[in-house]
Amino acid sequence: MIRRVLAARALRAFADGFIAVLLPAYLLALGLGQLEVGFISTATLFGSALATLAVGRWGHRFSIRRLLLGTSLLMAATGLAFAGLSSLWPLLIVAFVGTLNPSSGDVSVFLPLDHTLLAAAAPADARTSVFARYSFAGSLFGAIGALAAAAPEWLAARGALS
């Protein structure tokens, strides 16, 4: 269980780091202004905060598995919606309702769910090291994701991506 949570954290952190760099550039390329990009980033953070509070308040009514599956599907739907939309208001709605993270840190509903799983799965004498590995994986893979955000431009400059 612990390895799966750490792997999921690393994968999400990579995506978060990647998105943190590319999302503003993507939105600007769509023709949105800097203020509008700021509104969208704020909407994602505000929506994530409310979702996290909702899980804290009412999450006990559902299994953690169901919550993780639901939020994972919501994350995928958010990415698909962002790829298909280009005007401000639909993007704002998706940003608020979805689970897109415009920062390289984990500020989403996954964090308390992961912590619950780790606390339950780790032996008492290993909890500190498990949470340290969780944090380290998030920081490391978030940085790698941010670095990987340069890949599309690098590939395009070499004719491998149009």
Image: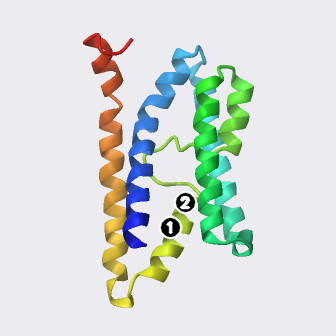
Q: Is residue 99 visible?
A: no
Residue 146 in percent (x, y) is at 35, 38
**Residue type beneath disc 1:** Asp
Residue 90 in percent (x, y) is at 73, 28
Picture residue at 32% right of the left edge, 27% below the top: 150
Q: Is residue 23 above or below residue 142?
A: above
Query: In the depicted view, which residue is nearer to us: 92 or 73?
Result: 73
Instruction: State the residue lying farthest toward the bottom.
Output: 124
How many residues crowd mark 1 within 10 Å: few (<14), some (14–19), many (20+)? Answer: many
Q: How many numbered markers are drawn?
A: 2
Residues tagged 2 and 1 counted as in contact (Cβ below 8 A): yes
Picture residue at 66% right of the left edge, 44% below the top: 98
Instruction: State the residue lying farthest toward the left.
Output: 158
Picture residue at 55% right of the left edge, 60% below the top: 110
How many residues crowd mark 2 within 10 Å: few (<14), some (14–19), many (20+)? Answer: many
**Residue type beneath disc 2:** Phe
Question: Quadrant of the image for the N terminus?
Answer: bottom left
The residue carrying mark 2 is 110
Picture residue at 40% right of the left edge, 82% below the top: 122
Q: Is residue 93 above or below residue 1?
A: above
Q: Disc 2 versus disc 1: distance between alpha carbons?
A: 6 Å
Report the disc number at residue 62.
Answer: none
Residue 86 in percent (x, y) is at 65, 20
Question: Quadrant of the image for the C terminus?
Answer: top left
Residue 60 in percent (x, y) is at 70, 75
Report the disc number at residue 114.
Answer: 1
Dot 1 falls on a residue whose secondary structure is helix
